Image: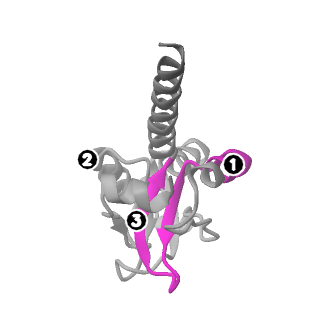
């Protein structure tokens, strides 16, 4: 199973926010859409950065409520780790664990943004994979024992 399998099932919508938008706007978008991170993009298609709930909370804790008026660019991560549609679930699990990343933008060979994968997506589809393997083993054992 690979990233494309997940994208085919969950969809390829990527919600973006302009780097010039405020952190308050980012927080509202995260809340209303039920997401944990947004891709920061000046044109809605390119990848300028990523901003997560954690990024906003850290800035808020350090500087107080007035930070909600700051722009997204002031606290987004601009050195974004990405993945490709052909990457395996196992490689994503490793990368996300090692780098402590919860969201990965998916880019194609021309660096066009084609989706977003969360750690929840990876865990969900890995469980599906394990259940399928378990069912196959069960059927194999039943076939050989009976």
Read off the residue under disc 2. Answer: 32
Q: Disc 1 marks which residue?
A: 94
In terms of sequence position, does the residue under pointer 1 or pointer 2 come before the other? 2
User: Residue at point 33% right, 59% down?
Assistant: 8
Which of 142/122 is in front?
A: 142
Cβ atoms at labels 2 and 3 below 8 Å apart: no
Query: Would residue 47 be visible to someone looking at this image?
Result: yes
- Secondary element at tag 3: strand
Q: How many labels does the image show?
A: 3
Q: Earlier in the sequence, mark 2 or mark 3?
A: 2
Q: How far apart are marks 2 and 3 (CA)?
A: 19 Å
Kindly state the secondary structure of the residue where label 1 is placed. helix
Which residue is nearer to you in this view: 58 or 1?
1
Q: Position of residue 44 (x, y in %)?
A: 34, 77
Which mark sits nearer the N-terminus, 1 or 3? Answer: 1
Separation of residues labelled 1 and 2 (CA atoms)? 30 Å
Answer above or below: position of 94 versus 15: above
Q: To which residue does mark 3 refer?
A: 115
Q: Give the range drawn in magenta.
A: 93-118
Whole-percent x, y for residue 122 in the image:
50, 45
């Amino acid at each position: 199973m690979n990233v494309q399998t997940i994208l085919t099932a969950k969809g390829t919508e990527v919600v973006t926010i302009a780097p010039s938008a405020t952190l308050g706007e980012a927080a509202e978008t995260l809340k209303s859409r039920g997401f944990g991170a947004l891709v920061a993009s000046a044109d809605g298609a390119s990848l300028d950065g990523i901003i997560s709930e954690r990024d906003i909370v850290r800035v808020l804790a350090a500087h107080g409520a007035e930070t909600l008026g700051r722009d997204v660019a002031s606290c987004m991560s601009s050195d974004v780790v990405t993945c490709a549609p052909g990457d395996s679930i196992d490689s994503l699990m490793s990368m996300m664990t090692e780098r402590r990343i919860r969201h990965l933008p998916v880019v194609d060979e021309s660096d066009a943004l084609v989706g977003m994968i969360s750690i929840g997506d990876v865990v969900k589809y890995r469980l599906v994979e394990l259940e399928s393997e378990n069912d196959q083993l069960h059927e194999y054992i039943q076939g050989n024992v009976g």
